[in-house]
Amino acid sequence: EIAHVAAAASPVGSDALVIALLAKLGRVFLLIPLSFILSFIMRRKNKDGTAKKSAPFPWFLIGFLIASIIGTYCNIPKSIITAFSNVIGPFLLASGMVGLGLNVHLSHLRTRALRPLLSMFIASIALSIFSYFTIFLF
């Protein structure tokens, strides 16, 4: 996520922040041709003539491309960008989280994700204990 990149790079300085954000946005931009290549590979037919299972297209990439074009070629006042990011940004983030949450079924968590959840819980406890002793004993 871009916020993690900003949080990691900002203590180093503004130059590091700019470079880190450009690297992260460049990686996201490279997902566009990769998604087309993978979509093409998935749609090829098997040797027996039947079509392979197709992969869904990540539509957020189109929104990212449109936002990049607008941000690059349109001179939008900073006050409008700030108002947009402070008001509409949290709403869109919450909408995305709700959309992800609506696809989660507790029965699937119990049957498919019990072992990964258990391993994440154990790793979190181990990391918490290690961090506690590292911070308070050394």
Image: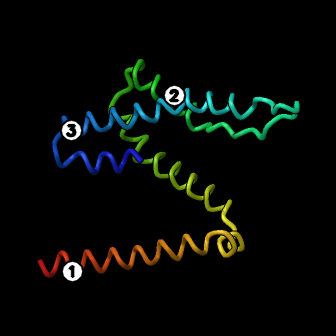
SS at mark 3 in the image: helix
Label 2 – label 3 distance at C-alpha: 24 Å
Q: CA distance from mark 2 to mark 1?
A: 46 Å
Q: Residue at x 40, y 47 (%)?
A: 86
**Dot 1 corresponds to which residue?**
133
Q: Residue furthest left?
A: 138
Q: Quadrant of residue 137?
A: bottom left
For the view shown, which residue lies furthest in the right direction? Answer: 49
Residue 56 in which image quadrant:
top right
Q: Is residue 71 above or below residue 117?
A: above
x and y, in percent, of residue 105 in the image = 69, 68
Q: Write the residue at 68% across / 31% down.
A: 41
Asked if disc 2 and disc 1 are in contact, CB closer than 8 Å, the reply is no
Q: Which residue is mark 3?
A: 16
Tell me which label, 2 or 3, sits earlier in the chain. Answer: 3
Q: Which of the two discs, 2 and 3, sits closer to the camera? A: 3
Left or right of residue 119: residue 20: left
Q: As shown in the figure, which amino acid type bears the numbered disc 2?
A: Leu
Marks 2 & 3, CB-CB < 8 Å contact: no
Report the residue marked by disc 2. Answer: 65
Amino acid type, callout 1: Phe
Q: Residue furthest front?
A: 47
Q: Secondary structure at mark 1?
A: helix
Give 27 or 101, whichever is nearer the viewer. Answer: 27
